[in-house]
Amino acid sequence: MRWPELRERYVIEEDSAVLALNKPAGIAVTGERHDTDIVELAAGDGETLYPVHRIDKVTSGLVLLAKDLGAHGELTRQFTKRTADKVYLAITASTGLPDRGVVDLPLSVGRKNRVRIAAPRESITRDGDTWRVDERELLAGKNYPSRTEFTAVLRAEEYTVLAVRPITGRRHQIRVHLAWIGHPLVGDPLFDRSGTHPRTHLHSWRLRLDASWRAPARLALEAPPGADFWNVGATALTAAAELLGDI
């Protein structure tokens, strides 16, 4: 898809300083080696965009891009300070999660640049509705404190739909956290090699940030998931889509 077509089809909101898109799964935001990404596509058509944040290529949903460096700096600082309010939707290939939970597990980067929990899997413990590891169990080397909070939106026979808040914004954080506590995302190529599902069921849904150039000085963005997100194999989780307005 050429940039003008992609831009028109997936734009959510735009003003003089930012462009927000509802990115389809399968296209990168930026920096994708040997591939085409949103920033590169825009540049090829004469438009310079600065990504405020990134979501994985396999993840669909809300992506915010700045048109100028002033807005970019103001917005990215909120991600750095963890004042940006981010909510994802995720479908896990399992049941048994509590109504609300916290995954407080440090991450590390291992061989071949793979993100993992910075401790042996067997050292992960569940304390009430919180998963954590004792600091004495952490592996040698650099690790990154990482916290994910979730709320169950819908429970189906084989699946659970979650609204997920990554309090820290580490690479692959949601995907690794959920997989390592035994509740992997449907169709995640990091943990599911079966090829049964055509996409990863993770969607960047809502984002709220301060924006000094606007009146009122706030960005409140939402990207509705497409039908491909709700269709999990032969199961269509249409009831979940109807519940989202109440969250």
Image (cartoon, rainbow, N blue to C red):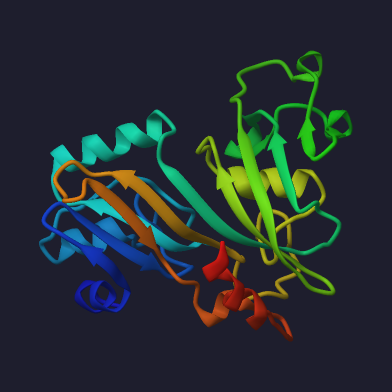
- Residue 117: image quadrant is top right
Q: Residue at x 77, y 36 (%)?
A: 130
Name the side, left or right, on which 200 lies relative to 118: left
Pick whichever, 117 or 1, lies toward us.
117
Name the side, left or right, on which 95 lies relative to 75: right
Q: Residue at x 70, y 39 (%)?
A: 102
Q: How many marks?
A: 0
- The residue at the far right in this view is 122
Q: Residue at x 65, y 17 (%)?
A: 141
Pick whichever, 33 or 90, lies toward us.
90
Q: Quadrant of the C terminus?
A: bottom right
Q: Where does the image place residue 133, in percent across and percent down from the top left?
A: 79, 25
Vertical relation: 143 (above or below) 55? above
Q: Quadrant of the N terminus?
A: bottom left
Q: Where does the image place residue 210, in percent across and percent down from the top left?
A: 28, 42
Vertical relation: 59 (above or below) 134? below
Q: Residue at x 14, y 66 (%)?
A: 45
Name the side, left or right, on which 147 lies relative to 10: right
Q: Is residue 234 visible?
A: yes
Q: Where does the image place residue 159, in percent across and percent down from the top left?
A: 77, 68
Q: Where does the image place residue 218, in percent across and percent down from the top left?
A: 27, 48
Name the side, left or right, on which 45 lies relative to 65: left
